[in-house]
Image (cartoon, rainbow, N blue to C red):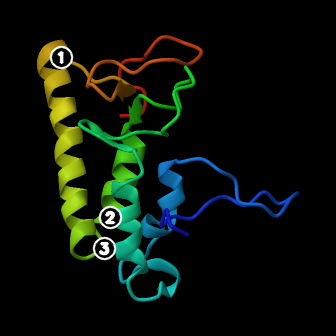
Amino acid sequence: NNTHCWHDLDAATGDQRPGIYPSNWAPLWATTESSIPFDLPDGVAEASVGGLEKSGLLCSSGILTSTYVSGEQWDAPNLWAPLQHLVVVGLAQVPGRGAELARDLATRWVNVCDQAWQKEGYLLEKYAADGDAGLGGEYEVQIGFGW
């Protein structure tokens, strides 16, 4: 499709589920050490990287959990460390722009974490797109929590 990503399939209706999430590009990081998964046709991985760049998920701190502002912790404006890791490792396996974007996103995230550490002396479970503490959810933002 023109978004150059994969969408979940609704098993009951057979329709693709709408929504922009980093998991829409999971085939890029669900890889082995030797190749992009599923023997993607030539150009598909590269086009998918372009789709990710245009998705609205990239921000100055890394990659958002979604493009939706719902007030929940799993949506914008939040960023979670495990998601940053998956995306960076996966993109690094796509030669050219994928690897470049991986380095760029890793640098963005490490800078956010370094600034937080320098300021507070600890890391949080999630951060917002502006580098401050993440927002939303059923509880206050936790120190550490999976780091």
Q: Residue drawn at (52%, 54%), measured in percent from left and top?
A: 23
Disc 2 residue crowd, few under 14, some 14–19, many 20+, Cα 10 Å: many
Whole-angstrom CA distance, mark 2 to mark 3, is: 5 Å
Q: Are marks 2 and 3 in contact (CB under 8 Å)?
A: yes
User: Where does label 2 land, which residue?
Assistant: 91
Give the number of the disc on residue 45: none
Which residue is more in the foreground, 16 or 115?
16
Quadrant of the rendered structure where residue 134 is? top left
Q: Position of residue 5 (x, y in %)?
A: 51, 64
Name the residue type under label 3. Answer: Val
Name the residue type under label 2. Answer: Leu
Quadrant of the rendered structure where residue 45 is? bottom left
Residue 10 appears left or right of 77: right
**Vertical relation: 131 (above or below) 13:** above
Which residue is more in the foreground, 36 or 34?
36
Residue 2 appears left or right of 16: left
- Name the mark nearer the viewer: 3 or 1: 3
- Viewport quadrant of the C terminus: top left
Q: Residue drawn at (31%, 56%), measured in percent from left and top?
A: 88
Helix, strand or loop at mark 2: helix
Give the number of the disc on residue 94: 3
Who comes first in sequence, dot 2 or dot 1? Answer: 2
Which residue is more in the foreground, 96 or 109?
96
User: Where does label 1 land, which residue?
Assistant: 121
**Vertical relation: 110 (above or below) 92:** above
